[in-house]
Amino acid sequence: MSFELSREHEDFRRSVRDFAEAQIAPYAAQWDREHHFPVETVQQMGKLGLFGLTTPEEYGGAGEDGDFTSLCVAIEEIGRVDQSMGITLEAAVGLGINPIATYGTDEQKQTWLPDLVAGTTLAAFGLTESGGGSDAGATKTKADLVDGQWVINGSKQFITNSGSDITSLVTVTARTGTRDDSRAEISTIIVPAGSSGFHAEKAYDKLGWHASDTHPLSFQDVRVPEANLLGQRGRGLGQFLATLDDGRVAIAALAVGCIQACLDLSVQYAGERTTLGGPIGRKQGVAFQIADLKVMLESSRLLTYKAAALKDAGASVATFKEAAAIAKLYATESAVTATRIATQVFGGYGFMEEYPVARFYRDAKVLEIGEGTSEVQRMLIARGLGLPVE
């Protein structure tokens, strides 16, 4: 059994790392400070092919030359220098492109995918609502079919890539009727940006991910063609939950990038910072904490790429779902711990915004929340063990 990535994946890692260090790392602190979403850099990521790693060649993607593992490698490397750009890539592919590539009609794919894959436009994933949170089935947004058009009313919140200058569409879940068992029928509908009545409200003032584009959305009698239904009517919730399984592994990869950054920064600082006659890395109290970072990194990376390999190998839904939940839970909670340790290693300097550990500290917490909280992951793992957890 091999625990190493292929030579091709490692070559790809180096190319993404070179790009990240040259085109993102020097500007990440400024973007964070100014809450700036760097459209030009996002489009450079598109030119590098990062948005097409899981998409067929006919739509401009990598086809057989790409896979889900490659996407995770790219997210990890981008996230190692800037978590905001890492989540931009993760959401653009996992939540924007993949639902259309997986469930879209030929016409929908031809209409939307080429520009999304090229990185000239972005798509968003509208699931979460106020009062719903982890209860995705509690969707209140409604879509009524009237004279061949869906008329959408409702709102969404915490939606990434939803209000940028290059956002072209948001795919939303909405109640489209009532099922035979009296539960809501939930479907998925493509809403183009600029549709009358569709508004991306003022961007959130977030704790972290300052350079990521995140907005609440409102829909007031938004009309789109009936053909904008994505996938089968009434299957929207299932489609989005399957999308989230992929996203959880991608978020784990983002967390791995965060841990790697914390380890790199801590090792460098512990070797340079001197006190009491020598570098602080000589002190067991510091060295042991950094050793723990290495353990968390290796464990998180192995769990993440095991899950990615299962995805690429076509593992069963149950097997992949469990692996995704385990990777997401462990890697994200480890990332939060890693940022705390790194900040402690830096001491007072770690509390200063001029040092990147402060930014990683702020960015990390949301990893335990987005695309399924830690509590949701524990619930999924427990269910996989046969426990009757609600």
Image (cartoon, grey):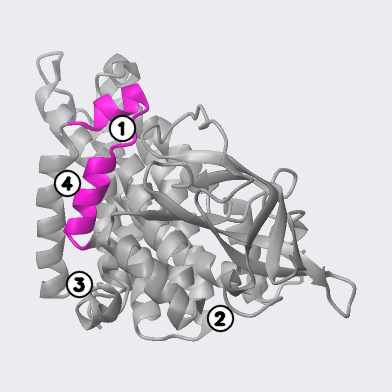
Was residue 30 drawn as part of the magenta stretch in this picture? yes
Question: Between marks 2 and 4, how big is the CA–CA gap?
Answer: 35 Å
Query: Mark 1: few, some, or many residues within 10 Å (few <14, many ≥20)?
Result: many
Q: Residue at x 39, y 39 (%)?
A: 212
Position above or below: 345 against 316: above
Question: Between marks 2 and 3, how big is the CA–CA gap?
Answer: 24 Å
Disc assigned to residue 342? 1
Determine the secondary structure under disc 1.
helix
Of badges 2 and 4, the one in the foreground is: 4
Is 302 displayed left or right of 169 in the figure? Answer: left
Q: Residue at x 61, y 65 (%)?
A: 189
Is 2 displayed left or right of 383 in the figure? Answer: left
N-term mark: 2 or 4: 4
Q: Which residues are magenta?
A: 27-49
Question: Between marks 1 and 2, how big is the CA–CA gap?
Answer: 36 Å
Q: What residue is disc 2 on?
A: 318
- Three-letter amino acid code of the residue under disc 1: Ala
Q: Are marks 2 and 3 in contact (CB under 8 Å)?
A: no
- Three-letter amino acid code of the residue under disc 4: Ala
Position above or below: 382 against 276: below
Question: Between marks 4 and 3, how big is the CA–CA gap?
Answer: 22 Å
N-term mark: 1 or 2: 2
Determine the secondary structure under disc 3.
loop
Residue 178 shows in the view? yes
Q: What residue is disc 3 on?
A: 4
Q: What residue is disc 4 on?
A: 20
Majority secondary structure of magenta residues:
helix
N-term mark: 4 or 3: 3
